[in-house]
Image (tube, rainbow, N blue to C red):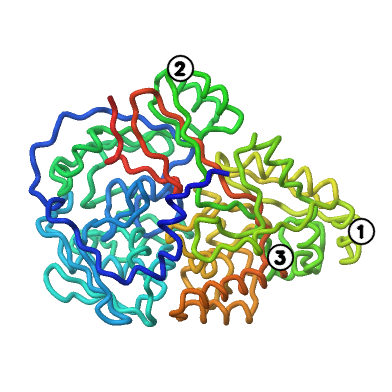
Amino acid sequence: MAPFPLLRRLLAGAALTALAAWAEPASAQSANAAPAPGRTFRLATSVDAATLDPHATNALFTFAVVSQIYEPLVHRGDDLRLQPGLATRWEQVEPTRWRFHLRDGVRFHGGEPFTAEDAAFSIARAKAPTSNYGIYVDTVERAEVAGPLVVDIITRTPDASIPDKLTRVLIMSRPWSEANRATQPQNFGQREETHTVRNTNGTGPYVIRRREVDQRTVFGRNDAWWGIAANAARGNVSEYHHIILSSDATRVAALLSGEVDMVHVVPAQDVERIRRQPNLRVLEGQENRTVFLGMNQELDELPGSDVRGRNPFKDLRVRQAIYHAIDMNAIRARTLRGQAVPTGSMWTQFVNGWSEDTDRRLPYDRDAARRLLAEAGYPNGFTVPLDCPVGTYDEACQAVTAMLAQVGIRAQLNLQPNTIFSARIQRREPPFYGLSWGVPTFDALYTLRSIMMSRAAAGVASWNAGGWSNPAFDALVLRIEVEPDAERRRAMIREAHALHNDQVGHVPLYHVMIPWAVRAGVHVNHRADNQFQIREVRVD
């Protein structure tokens, strides 16, 4: 496991100690200078953005694309520290009021000036029913314009993590959105077609020049970007090619041949081969992301199952049997070639609220799994579809399928493109699924609310596609949300996590290791959130 000692120190209790005002040094606000000559950077990855609407789907690969175009009030830099974005400074002026002082002279790509009206509008848009970014504004009651370049965010309860959450809320132009009938986010789950699905207008360092969905998106540098002068010492990319190569073999071949400069998703089986190439480098580290299995526990009968009139997943013994049937150490060693950290936790050690006592897996025990299935009334097992996305952790899903078959659970693996898979998850269609989940706020409440809390309590922020629900757990989450004492809050997080684990609400599998590969002469910082900001990349 990569230790990340600096990151541990930076993030320990960060969500609860962010009360001090953040102010940008005056030197960082210098006027724009003429942009330096730039370089072309070509990155190959496995999955395209599912949409260009910045509030429609809270998905890793979508954010990786749209965050080059749109910007938040608060940036998270390559060192994962908070940095000024469209806000130059912020402070908590009252227990339930945060004040953000906005950057002057910023314009959207369409030419509109950026104002507090745009910030307030974007925060309200992220709260809309069709938004999938509700988890970042879950405590926000409203945003108020307090001046042309001042916006106040009023929360229904004190929330010290507001600056962390706002690193993921991207800002749109209110006039542009209104003119294009896009004041509400795209209803991604229902495949709604809106102007913002294919068109953009941000304030960020890059604009889209050409887009071929699921193939290639070409970005050009925004030479009018407010940060171009201050950024010149770090990044020099003037043209960025975001290339989709879903085949692992094709992606690696493109890197070996020099057709691309970086591979974002390196297959575990190719890491050593790439490492041996003198003109290539492998950048390794653990991602702040966990892969787990979800089970539909609310339907009376599972679609696609050979069990009629009842739902096996409603029985705790069946959920325990699934857990016992999976040899995660074998998957790590054989399938993932060491590129995984087996876990019993729903979040990583980077997250405020992680504890060693809730990170213990149930033991691998096939006999116990078979016995539990028989006790639950399934001595011969049962059949059920298992949904997983292509290109991210499909090998792990294949290994899980084989292990479940050995105890009688015949999981019919249904591998799908990420866009289709994500939409099915949002519509709560899969009876059994594998999902990976990162924690961009670096606080456990993010996962407690979005993955584990009852959907009725979590509202539009919910990704609880399996419908696990426990009233005692929900009550704990509501207490965690308002608890001001850091240690008491962490104790309640441990209590909630232990309750979830005892009930096997989900089956955690492993924390993701994320090897990136780059050619010599490409300088990019490996990040535990698996994001890359092209503005920070330098090409020799």
Mark 2 burial class by Cα count in 10 Å: few <14, some 14-19, many 20+: few
Look at 35% across and 66% down and name the residue there: 126
The mark that comes first in sequence, 3 or 2, is: 2
Amino acid marked by disc 2? Pro
The mark that comes first in sequence, 3 or 1, is: 1
Could you tell whether 518 is left or right of 229 in the image?
Answer: right
Q: Quadrant of residue 526?
A: top left
Residue located beneath label 1 in the image: 379
Q: Nearer the viewer, residue 517 or 470?
A: 517
Amino acid marked by disc 1? Pro
Q: Quadrant of residue 469?
A: bottom right
Q: Is residue 90 placed above or below 201 in the rendered structure?
A: below
Look at 27% across and 37% down and name the residue there: 219
Where disc 3 sits, the SS reads loop
Callout 3 touching callout 2 (CB < 8 Å): no
Where disc 2 sits, the SS reads loop
Q: Is residue 183 placed above or below 260 in the rendered structure?
A: below
In 3D space, how far apart are the residues under numbered discs 1 and 2 (Cα atoms)? 55 Å
Rendered location of residue 271, percent (x, y) = 55, 28
The mark that comes first in sequence, 1 or 2, is: 2
Where disc 1 sits, the SS reads loop
Which is more foreground, mark 3 or mark 1?
3
Q: Quadrant of the C terminus?
A: top left
Amino acid marked by disc 3? Val
Could you tell whether 126 is left or right of 495 in the image?
Answer: left
Which is more foreground, mark 1 or mark 2?
2
Look at 65% across and 39% down and name the residue there: 395
Question: Residue 278, labelled with which disc?
Answer: 2
Residue located beneath label 3 in the image: 504
Could you tell whether 164 is left or right of 221 in the image?
Answer: right
In 3D space, how far apart are the residues under numbered discs 3 and 2 (Cα atoms)? 46 Å
